[in-house]
Image (cartoon, rainbow, N blue to C red):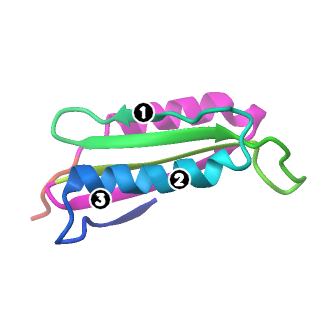
Amino acid sequence: MTMGRVPAVANPDEFRAWVTEQSRKEFQQQSVEKELLVEPIGKGDVHGSQVCATDRAPKPDEYKYVCQGIFTHEGAALIFTMLYNDSGKEDAKQALAALDALQFTQGT
């Protein structure tokens, strides 16, 4: 995970779309799926999107699955990448559900 700011000159919706589109293009080259869908994620005023793919031919030291996404809230941005194999599917599903419930709070 990487936490940062949406660029000051960027619209948060457009920035999210750009980040996930870059991931989609990169993953599409090697994915089993013919078409990769960008899915909305997040709840309330936390908006996000993600794209997931299955590697067509992972090398022995690589992962079979990847999900990458971004959440934004009031200028803050959190970008995540999740890599896993078949044995980690349930853990990845739980981690994605936890991320989908993400809330941003103001520090004091």
N-term-proximal mark, 1 vs 3: 1
Q: Which mark is residue 39?
A: 1
* Residue position for label 3: 77
- Is residue 1 on the magenta stretch? no
Residue 71 at x, y = what percent?
32, 49
Callout in the foreground (1, 3): 1
Mark 1 residue crowding within 10 angstroms, few (<14) / some (14–19) / many (20+) = few
In the image, residue 107 sits, relative to residue 50, either above or below, namely below
Residue 7 at x, y = what percent?
24, 70
Secondary element at tag 2: helix
Secondary element at tag 3: strand
Amino acid type assigned to the residue bearing label 2 in the image: Ser
N-term-proximal mark, 2 vs 3: 2
Q: Residue at x 50, y 37 (%)?
A: 95
Mark 3 residue crowding within 10 angstroms, few (<14) / some (14–19) / many (20+) = many
User: Outermost residue, right direction?
Assistant: 60
Q: Residue at x 25, y 42 (%)?
A: 47
Relative placement, left or right, of 85 versus 72 is right
Amino acid type assigned to the residue bearing label 1 in the image: Glu
Residue 53 at x, y = what percent?
64, 39
Q: Which mark is residue 62?
A: none
Question: What is the distance, in whole Å, between disc 1 and disc 3 at their CAs?
Answer: 17 Å
Viewer-proximal residue among 84 and 53? 53
The C terminus, quarter of image: bottom left
Relative placement, left or right, of 20 versus 4 is right
Question: Which stretch did the figure color magenta?
Answer: 74-103
* Residue position for label 2: 23
N-term-proximal mark, 2 vs 1: 2
Amino acid type assigned to the residue bearing label 3 in the image: Ala
